[in-house]
Amino acid sequence: MDLSYTPEEEEFRARLREWLGKVLPSLPPKPSPDDWPGRRAYDLGWQRMLYDAGYADVHWEGTPSVRLIFLEETERAGAPYVGANFVGLLHAGPTIAAEGTPEQRARWLPPVLRGEEVWCQGFSEPGAGSDLAALRTRARRDGDDYVVSGSKIWTSHAEVADWCELLVRTDPDAPRHRGISWLALPMDAPGVTVRPLRTLAGSAEFAEVFLDDVRVPVANRVGDENDGWRVTMVTLSFERGTAFVGEVVACRRVLGELALTARRNGRWDDPALRRRLGRLNGEFRALWRLTQWNVSAAEASGGVPGVGGSVFKLRYSHARQELYDAAAEVLGADSLDLERPWVLDRLSSLSYTIAAGTSQIQRNIVGERILGLPKGR
C-alpha cells in the first residue's frame, strides 16, 4: 500500500498552503457559538471563498488523497471548519454525487459548493438511534409525491438548514433493511416542525424534527425506492471515512499544547501523565497512518471509503475522549472552569462514541464485515 503523495498532489498542497496564508488574516471575527444565523452566514461566506478560489469541490471531484491534503492543510492553518456546511459537503453532497441522477446533481450540488444552501441529517429517531434500520418514519406514495409522517432526533443543523437527507420507510412489510428510501426533504415544506436541543456543552447544533403529512416529490428520492439502506451505507462510509480527518490533525495539535502546558504548571513531573501523553501521541500517529491507508484503499476502489472507516471511527472516538481526559488531568481544578481551553471540548468528546454510529455498532461492522464473524442472534 503506497502511502506517499504524487508530485501533483504535493503541488496542490503548496498552492493551497500559499492561498490560506493570504486569505485567513482577512477573515471577519467568528460569531458567537449560540448565534446560529450568524454562524450559518459565516460558514457559507467561507464556502463561497473556497468556491471562488477553486477549492470548493475537492470533497467530490478531488481524489481521496487530495481531500486528505485539503483537510490536513486547512486544519493546520486554523481555517474555518465546515460548520453548518458539514452535512452538505461531507455527507449528502458526496452521496448525491455518487448515487444521484444528472438532474439531482445539477440541482443540489452547485448551491452547496457556492455556499448558498445548508443541509441537515435526518437519520436517527427516538426509538431507533443506534439501530438505524428500525426507523419508523413512514413515506406513503401518493401520485408523484411521498406523504411523510414521523419524527427525527439529533438532526444536525436542522434549525438553519434548507434541505434534509431523510431516511424513511417506504415498504413497512419488507425486511427492515429493504423497505427504506433516501429522500431530499425541503425544510420549508408545510408540516415540518423543528425544535432545537441543547447539549451538555450548552450548544444547540441538534434538533428534533417532526413531520406531519409532509409532501416530498418522488423526484427527490436518491436511488431506487426501498434501496435506501444501500445508499445510506454510502453516506455513512463518507461520514466515517474522511469526515474526521481534520479533527485528527487538531487532536495532534492539542496534544502538543497539553505537553507545553504541563511543563509550565508542573504537571510534567508526573511520570504517569508523561506516559499517558506519550501513548496518546502514538495513538494519533497511528490513526493518521490508518487514515492514509483508508484513503489509498478508497482510491483503489473508485473513491468511496470502505468499511475500514469503521475501524478508524471506533478507535478515534475513544482516543479523543482519552485526550480530553488527559487535558483535565493537566488542568487540574481549572478543568471545571468552562472558560478554560479544552473544557468544552471534553464535554463534546463524550458524544463521539455515539455520533456517526455507536462504538457497539462499529464493533459489529468490524467483526462481521472485516473479520468475517457470524452475526449475533
Image (cartoon, rainbow, N blue to C red):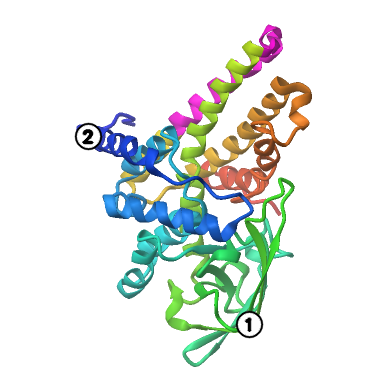
Is 25 within the magenta? Answer: no
Q: Nearer the viewer, residue 181 or 82?
A: 82
Q: Which residues are magenta?
A: 265-290
Q: Is residue 265 left or right of residue 25?
A: right
Mark 2 highlights which residue?
Answer: 11
Instruction: Residue type at mark 2: give it.
Output: Glu
Mark 1 highlights which residue?
Answer: 191
Disc 1, SS:
loop
Q: Residue 275: x and y, percent?
A: 64, 13
Number of marks present in the image shown: 2
Q: Is residue 343 left or right of residue 289?
A: right
Q: Residue 223: x and y, percent?
A: 43, 71
Local crowd at mark 1 within 10 Å, few (<14), some, or many (≥20)?
some
Task: Give the residue displayed 40% in from the left and 34% down from the top.
Answer: 292
Quadrant that contains the C terminus: bottom right
* Residue 122 visible to an observer of this rendering: no
Q: Residue 333: x and y, percent?
A: 79, 24
Instruction: Residue type at mark 1: give it.
Output: Gly
